[in-house]
Image (cartoon, grey):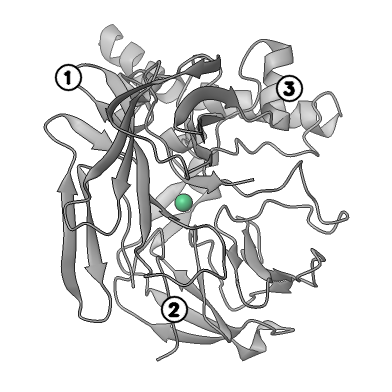
């Protein structure tokens, strides 16, 4: 009886973590964090790097600065950039933490000071710890006005923390959309407080325009990405709901899957001044994380471990290319880079390279793979052995200047 009471009490105060947020379980294997490394020359182990391909491939991903004390979701690791500079046939690897306000604050403190909201609170101890942090924030002991984001998802070519002349005071999506014709950027902010979704536009001069709160999205449905067409912005309301109550009761991750909730797609003019013009369409079970493309007249979500890649002709809807990385080998998000970066050069749309980091779980080694995007087999143009294991991550980009 004594034992039963003791177990029940400790389950309320400090219950065991769910595997999905147990840092010992999540951040293991090739998701275990690595240290920063100075620029290091790499060996080309297959093929040759094209002399004409000069630039830097940079990929972001989660890499916790400290061993978490409690629950830590994969999405909550501090952002780390893994870069590979390609120059005159040579490759140089380097990796650095994204120096976010949270990273610096915790580095100075020497411990993980900010509670992890996404993984949620498990039991009374977590809730108490959260309330103590809230008290420190309210009394000004802990400054968070510069944000508590981990910046681990995506990359944009902006030289510093950018608040658009103090016009963006909240977080913004990791997937802003740029219209290459008009040079405008469209983005949104998401919040668990109402209004949950706010849409805005940054014009070609980098000036952020007035935000349009989407009041017709009544619940904090998780939205990670969206799409634009020539005239519209398109949002999708999923069945994944943020539940503050669940979190504050110490019942785990604040996300709840509501099977009976309707899923909708909202279409709004890119230049809408208010949300009265948004049109919602019910689309049963439309739960997606990422959108590839949209046009006026598609969809894949990603999994953290990718065994290969396929190429699909969107006009004929046929699979026209395929490659697997091999047994025990997993790649990241494949990135397409045009062979000729000059915009005025006319060439086939698949004339170029597909690049990604690939990890071999048998040898625990990572390579950078440069493939021919045009060949149906995605033949290797060059494989670069990396001087260290590169953990799996999220999104990347290629900069040519
Ligand atoms: Fe994403």
Q: Is mark 1 within 8 Å of ligand 1?
A: no
**Alpha carbon of mark 3 to alpha carbon of mark 2: how far?**
39 Å
From this view, report whether residue 152 is shown above or below residue 90.
below
Residue 125 in the image: state x and y as whole percent: 53, 21
In front of the other: label 1 or label 3?
A: 1
From this view, report whether residue 59 is shown above or below residue 335.
above
Mark 3: give few (<14), some (14-19) or many (20+) Cα within 10 Å: some
**Alpha carbon of mark 2 to alpha carbon of mark 1: how far?**
43 Å
Q: Which residue is mark 3?
A: 105
From this view, report whether residue 78 is shown above or below residue 230.
above
Answer whether labels 1 and 3 touch (C-beta < 8 Å). no
In front of the other: label 2 or label 1?
A: 1
Mark 1: give few (<14), some (14-19) or many (20+) Cα within 10 Å: few
Residue 5 in the image: state x and y as whole percent: 33, 15
Q: Which residue is mark 1?
A: 362
Q: Is residue 151 left or right of residue 163?
A: left
Mark 2: give few (<14), some (14-19) or many (20+) Cα within 10 Å: some
Answer whether labels 3 and 2 touch (C-beta < 8 Å). no
Residue 298 in the image: state x and y as whole percent: 34, 73
Which circle's residue, 2 or 1, is located before the other in the chain? 2
> Element under label 3?
helix
Q: Quick one: 126 or 361, which is closer to the camera?
A: 361
**Alpha carbon of mark 1 to alpha carbon of mark 3: how far?**
37 Å
> Element under label 1?
loop
Q: Which residue is mark 2?
A: 265
Q: Is residue 73 left or right of residue 136?
A: left
Q: Quick one: 167 or 256, which is closer to the camera?
A: 167
Q: Is mark 2 within 8 Å of ligand 1?
A: no
Q: Quick one: 29 or 146, which is closer to the camera?
A: 29
> Element under label 2?
strand
């Amino acid at each position: 009886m004594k034992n039963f009471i003791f177990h029940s009490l400790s389950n309320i105060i400090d219950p065991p973590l769910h595997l999905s947020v147990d840092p010992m379980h999540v951040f293991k294997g090739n998701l275990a964090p690595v240290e920063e490394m100075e620029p290091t020359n790499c060996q080309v182990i297959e093929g040759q790097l094209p002399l004409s391909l000069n630039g830097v491939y940079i990929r972001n991903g989660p890499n916790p600065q400290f061993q978490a004390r409690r629950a830590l979701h994969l999405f909550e690791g501090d952002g780390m950039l893994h870069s590979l500079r390609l120059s005159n046939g040579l490759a140089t690897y380097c990796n650095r933490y994204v120096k976010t306000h949270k990273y610096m604050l915790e580095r100075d403190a020497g411990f993980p000071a900010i509670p992890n909201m996404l993984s949620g609170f498990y039991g009374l101890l977590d809730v108490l710890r959260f309330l103590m942090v809230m008290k420190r924030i309210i009394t000004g002991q802990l400054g968070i006005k510069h944000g508590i984001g981990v910046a681990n998802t995506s990359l944009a070519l902006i030289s510093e923390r950018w608040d658009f002349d103090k016009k963006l005071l909240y977080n913004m999506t990791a997937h802003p959309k740029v219209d290459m014709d008009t040079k405008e950027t469209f983005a949104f902010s998401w919040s668990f407080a109402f209004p949950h979704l706010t849409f805005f536009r940054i014009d070609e001069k980098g000036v952020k325009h007035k935000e349009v709160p989407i009041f017709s999205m009544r619940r904090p449905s998780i939205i990670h990405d969206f799409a634009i067409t020539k005239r519209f912005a398109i949002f999708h309301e999923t069945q994944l709901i943020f539940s503050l109550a669940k979190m504050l009761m110490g019942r785990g991750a604040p996300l709840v899957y509501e099977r009976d909730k309707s899923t909708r797609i909202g279409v709004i003019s890119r230049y809408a001044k208010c949300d009265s013009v948004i049109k919602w369409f019910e689309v049963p079970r439309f739960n997606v994380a990422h959108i590839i493309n949209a046009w006026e007249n598609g969809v894949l979500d990603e999994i953290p471990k990718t065994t290969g890649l396929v190429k699909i002709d969107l006009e004929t809807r046929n699979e026209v290319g395929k490659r697997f990385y091999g047994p025990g080998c997993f790649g990241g998000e494949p990135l397409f880079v045009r062979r000729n970066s000059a915009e005025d050069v006319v060439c086939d749309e698949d004339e170029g390279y597909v690049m990604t980091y690939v990890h071999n779980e048998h040898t625990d080694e990572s390579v950078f793979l440069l493939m021919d995007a045009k060949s149906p087999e995605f033949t290797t143009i060059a494989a670069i052995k990396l001087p260290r294991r590169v953990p799996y991550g999220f999104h990347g980009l290629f900069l040519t200047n």
